Image (cartoon, rainbow, N blue to C red):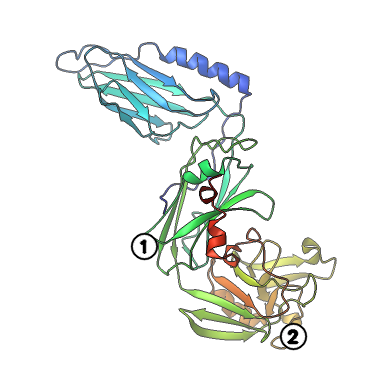
Amino acid sequence: MRSRRSLSSSSRRSIRPRHAAVAGVAALAATLSACSDGGSGSGSGAAEKPKVSVNLTGEKATAGVPVTVRLATKDARLKDVTVADAEGTKLAGEVAADGRTWTSARKAAPGTSYSVRAVTDKGGEAKRTFRTAAPEQVNKVTITPGRGLRTVGVGQPLSIVFDHPVANKTEVEKHLKVSTDNDTTGSWGWIKNYDGKDRVDWRPEKYWKPGTEVRLDAQLDGIDSGEQGGWFVRDYDTAVTVGRNQVVKVDLDSRTATLTRDGRKVRSVPMSAGTPGGEKASWGGTSVLMSKEGTINMRSETVGLGDSYDKMVDYSMRLTWSGMYAHAAPWNAAYFGNTNHSSGCVGMSTSHASWLYGQVQVGDPFEVSGSGSKGVPDPGNGYGAWNLSWTDWQAKSALEQGS
């Protein structure tokens, strides 16, 4: 299991060439070694102004690195230390047993200004500011589900897509924490998104239990994603609740789509899926409802099928990035329930599509069975992780691989 944190888009940081960032850190360290602003208090030694040095140390001067605050005042000990960025986010750390030093538990974010406040047991106070060097490149992420989606279906994974390559997959995965209120067993798996970007998904061993509260805490601030990837400059988090236990079972042989809830049939409607034997065949296996998109324009050239159609389509429910939907298809009415004769989507009457659209929730699995499919979609083509066995999915974890 893993823990929590905050899903928001990355703030913009200035980017400097490597040589400029190195010079900046060297100058900064020299400046911060000087005496700080003093404070006064009561008791022996209270009038003394403590001297606090802030040293930025690490393998690379361009990196966000651990911050160490050292007190130089004679016979005094650190009582309280706060290191926080401009937004008030504190950098956790610990005071050493002798009270002379404080060391951050995490790396400070690259290209970020921090304020330091150190209070001694003699009542002295020191304040100081510093700024870490900006990275050459910042790696940003897109996380699903985002903050706007509060309830998801039992098949919804947690998914993170990275703007730039991630070479340090093990290090990144160590900082991705998932927590649930019922200790759900799950695993991260590294895959390629449909657009070729690096992506990591967390799915449970089995479908989520309804009502499960899930939090993702991506503690990436100050982590190096590796060669060509750049540094992360903030943390992210999101939280969702798992909704009703619903599965849509699409049977290519009986040409029906059946909504089940808690394992029981709610309703079965006639449909027509993709024409077997070529690119117009439907994907089989399990896909997860990615989004409910309403009325959209579907054009065949966007999915490599020439100019065979260009239609406004109602009650569109996306199942893959490659363009498989469930939707209303009144033009195909002659085939509902008897022949699979679409361009890959699951089509049904407008009234049936309207009903299904109103029942399903993002994250509901669509399980496609029967003959005539073109196989199962890749895990990155939508949310196809459920087409892998639990053992095969676990093997995609960088921590499992030890890479």
Quarter in which the C terminus is drawn: top right
Q: Height in image: 346 above or below 401? A: below
Q: Against 150, is 173 above or below? A: above
Q: How many marks?
A: 2
Label placed on residue 182: 1
Q: Secondary structure at mark 1?
A: loop
Residues marked 2 and 1 touching at CB (< 8 Å): no
Crowdedness near tag 2: few (<14), some (14–19) or many (≥20) residues, C-alpha within 10 Å = some
In screen coordinates, is 13 left or right of 118?
right
Residue ID at (67%, 73%): 284
The span from disc 2 to disc 1 (Cα, nearest Å) is 44 Å
Q: Is residue 206 left or right of residue 348?
A: left
From what the image shows, is residue 88 above or below residue 376?
Answer: above
Choose top left, top right, bottom left or bottom right for residue 51.
top left
Quadrant into which the N terminus falls: bottom left
Q: Earlier in the sequence, mark 2 or mark 1?
A: 1
Q: Residue furthest left?
A: 43
Residue situated in front as seen by the camera: 23 or 188: 188
Q: Residue at x 59, y 79 (%)?
A: 249
Q: Secondary structure at mark 2?
A: loop
Q: Nearer the viewer, mark 2 or mark 1?
A: 1
Q: Which residue is mark 2?
A: 339
Q: Residue 321: image x %, image y %? A: 67, 61
- Amino acid carrying mark 2 in the image: Thr
Q: Position of residue 270 (x, y in %)?
A: 65, 86
Q: Is residue 159 visible?
A: no
Q: What amino acid is found at the position of numbered circle 1 in the picture?
A: Asn
| Identity of the residue furthest to the right in this view | 307
Quadrant position of residue 269: bottom right
